[in-house]
Image (spheres, helix red, strand yellow):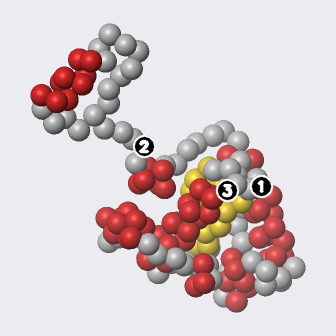
Amino acid sequence: MYIGKETTFITNLFRKTNIKIAFWTNNTIQNLLMHKQQTSDIYSRSGVYKLMCPDCGKAYVGQTGRSFATWFREHKKAFRIASRSSNFAKHLMDHTHSFGPIHNIMQILQLQNKGAHLNTLERFHIYTEYTSNNHLNDDLTISSNKIFDTLVKPHQS
C-alpha cells in the first residue's frame, strides 16, 4: 500500500538492488483458500474435491492425499455394492439417484498435498456448501470461523 514520502524513501533505498518493493500481494488468505489450479491430468492429483448429485445438485465435499480418480472409484464402489460408507453413495441410494461419470459429477476445488493446509481447505469448502444449504457431509464436519464467514458472505446470494 502506498503511504507517501515514506514509501518513496524505502523504494529508493532498494532501487539499486535486486530486491523489488511490492505495494500489494496476491498471497492473501482468500486466494490461498479459494485459488483453483489446472493441470492436464487433474484426476491423478490430490486435494479437495466436490461430488455433485447429477439428479438434485446436492454436493459432498471431501479431500484425498491419493489421486482423485482413486477416491472417485471408492465412492462408486460404495454405491455399486450398496455400502453406507460414503455419504455421497448413501444419498444416491436413499433417493434412487444415479451415479455419473467422473467428469460429470466430480469437481476439483483445490489441488493440495496431504497435510494441515489440506484439512483447512476441506473444512472451508464444506462450510461453503453448508451455508448454501447444499451439503451432504455429516453435520459434525461443519466448522465455522470468522475467516470463513468473511470469505463466504460476499459469495452468498
Circle 1 is placed at which residue position? Answer: 66
Q: Mark 3 to mark 2: distance in Å?
A: 19 Å
Camera-nearest residue between 96 and 108: 108
Classify residue 84 by image quadrant. Answer: bottom right
Camera-nearest residue between 145 and 101: 145
Residue type beneath disc 1:
Arg
Q: Quadrant of the N terminus?
A: top left
Across and down, in percent, residue 33 comes to 49, 55
Say above or below: 51 vs 19.
below
The residue shown at (23%, 17%) is 12
Please indicate, yes or no, whether residue 140 appears anywhere in the rendered image. Answer: yes
Circle 3 is placed at which residue position? Answer: 115
Q: Secondary structure at mark 1?
A: loop
- Please tell me whether mark 1 or mark 3 is closer to you in this view: 3
Across and down, in percent, residue 87 comes to 70, 80
Residue type beneath disc 2:
Asn
Residue type beneath disc 3:
Gly
The residue shown at (69%, 77%) is 88
- Please tell me whether mark 1 or mark 2 is closer to you in this view: 2
For marks 1 and 3 on the same chain, the one whose residue lies earlier in the sequence:
1
Residue with the most extreme top position: 16
